[in-house]
Each structure stands twice: as structure tokens, then as C-alpha cells.
Image (spheres, grey):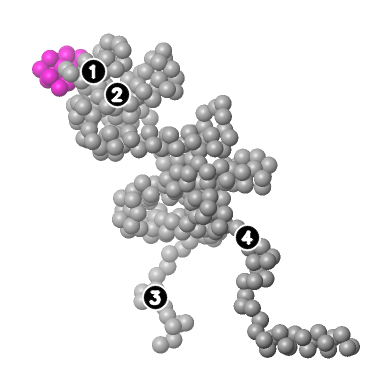
Amino acid sequence: MDETRRKLNTPALLAVPVRDARLLLDAADGDCALLYLHILENGGVLDTALAAQTLRLSERAVQGVAGRLERLGLLAPAEERPAGAARELPEYQAADVVRRSQSDPGFQALVEETQRILGRVLTSTDLKKLFGIYDDLALPADVIMLLVHHCKEDHDERYGADRHLGFAAIEKEACVWFDKELVTYEQAEEYLARLRERKTLAAEVQRAMGIRGRELSATERRYVTSWIEMGFGPEALALAADRTVTNTGQLKWRYMDSIVRSWHSKGLHTVDEIEQGDRKPSSATRQTAGSAPDARELERMKKLREKLRSQ
């Protein structure tokens, strides 16, 4: 069989725009190319669960790759949903909420714990929102308590304990947990542990990059989060930042992202791996890269030199 003339059993056309092909080739990111082709094959719409199953990746990994496609301009940004828009919660009557709080020990305990965490008595509007999370989203009371504690802790760290935490923020976060199917206390704890680990690592990355005296912007946080999800630590990202500043004169995040993605595509994630695998060969290395000349080659070169000298 002539292996050089093998063809697909079923000829098919999957048109890739030249611009998109060039961006994918320049990115040198195999995961991006595979996800792009998968999305193209499925009508241009990303189904994270289907993509994860087809490409044998976790849904978290698919989301990370989708973010890189978005930054390349090949995937439309995910639509931001306003608070409460993730799911329309019904409008409860105050009397119904009060009656339920009196007849349902679980909800009564939730109200008391929420008031303790927030350090204030819940208003009628607050009670309606809390009841919506408990009744319509059907999150267990212990999960909601953990949710409220997380929202309060995050809010105080960002804005200070003196600033009022509105219940709309809690409702929005509850919708996020509902979408992530965090329906048990163990799942919620595991999710929060991952958030804390990522937050700690992001702070270390920020220090390693020499960014002090300010918070990262939302775009900067997305970059850092995607790099962490690729498997890079503070030292490797500090090296990428140094190369970015050396080559461009300033910290250009998109340029740095291209460096990091290039390393990721080569499987280089630690400083040692990067220095060994991303280093251009020296002249001495290039000279010794080939096989050493044998005795006949040396004799031929000697005769050639003698011939040239006699001319």
C-alpha cells in the first residue's frame, strides 16, 4: 500500500476561516485548536459538558481553554448575567415567609444564623430573598449558612467590615452555587477550599511579578487564574513577566499570555523545565549537534587544506 496517498474514508468539508487558522497557528496551542474544531463541528456553539466528554478533558479545563479562545478573539465572551437573572425567583409575600419561619425549624435556624453572621436584623426584603434561596433554589440550610459566611468574609476583605453587605450579592452568589450544583455541605466546602487555594496562589503570583500597592483588575485576575489552571506557579510566571518587560519595555499582559501559552503547549511549567526546554541552542551546541567526523572525513579535509595551500 502506498502510505503517502491515504485518504479519509468519508470526504467531508469543515471550513476554517484563514484568519482563524492563522491565529490558531500563531498561538501554537493544541487544546485551543481542538476545542475550536469541536465547536465548529457542533454549529459554532460551545457545550462545555459535551466538549469535556469528546475531548477527554474536565469541564474546568474546557472552560480554561475557552477563555484562551476568547482572548484570541475566536470565541464570543460569555454573557454577564445580572444579580438574580440566573434564575427568576418568585415574589413571596411577607406573611408567607413569616409563617414558614414559624413552622419550619430549618428555616428558622437559618434566619437566626444569617442575622448573626451579618450582625443585623434582616429586613422584610432580606427575608424574602433568603426564603427564595431556601425554597425555590432548594439549597440546604447548612449550605446556605456556609454561603452567607463566605459572602460576608469576602465582602469584609474587599471593602471592610463597616460597609453594608446587601442581600442582592448573597442572592447572586447563591445562583452561582445553584448553577454549580453545590447541593451538599461537603461539595460547598470543597469548592471554597479550591477558591482559597487559588486566591492564595494568585496573591503569590502578584508578589512574584512585583505588583504591589494595588488590586489586580478583573482582566488581570482572569489572566492569572487561567495561568494557574494551566499548572504554572509564581516562579515560572515571574520569569514570564521578566521576559515580557525585557522584550517590550513594560508588563503587557497579552504578550505575557502568549509566552505562557507557548510554554504550556510545549509541556513546560516549572522554571527548570522552561530553562531547559525553551532555551535556544548555543553556537557550541549547534556545532556538536551532528555526528563527529570519522577518520576518512578528517583525511579528506586534510588533503583539501593541503591542496588549497599549494594553489
Alpha carbon distance from label 1 to label 3: 64 Å
Residue 49: give x, y in percent of width and height.
31, 50
**Residue with the most extreme top position:** 121
In the picture provided, is 202 more to the left or to the right than 289? left
Please tell me whether mark 3 sits on a helix, a strand or a loop. loop
Q: Which residues are magenta?
A: 91-107
**Residue with the most extreme left position:** 103
Residue at (16, 17) in percent of width and height = 108
Q: Is residue 193 visible?
A: yes
Q: Is there CB contact under 8 Å for labels 1 and 3? A: no
Above or below — where is 108 with respect to 23?
Answer: above
* Disc with the residue nearer the chain's start (3 vs 2): 3
Residue 148: mark in rendering: 2
In the picture provided, is 210 more to the left or to the right than 195? right
Alpha carbon distance from label 2 to label 4: 52 Å
Give neighbour class at mark 2: few <14, some 14-19, many 20+ (Cα, 10 Å): many
**Residue topped by disc 3:** 8
Please tell me whether mark 4 sits on a helix, a strand or a loop. loop
Residue at (38, 30) in percent of width and height = 82
User: Toward which corner of the image does residue 78 lie, by quadrant?
Assistant: top left
Residue 203: give x, y in percent of width and height.
48, 33
* Disc with the residue nearer the chain's start (1 vs 3): 3
The kind of residue on which mark 2 rests is: Val
> Which is more foreground, mark 2 or mark 4?
4
**Residue topped by disc 1:** 113
Residue 53: give x, y in percent of width and height.
30, 55
Residue at (79, 87) in percent of width and height = 304
**Residue topped by disc 4:** 280
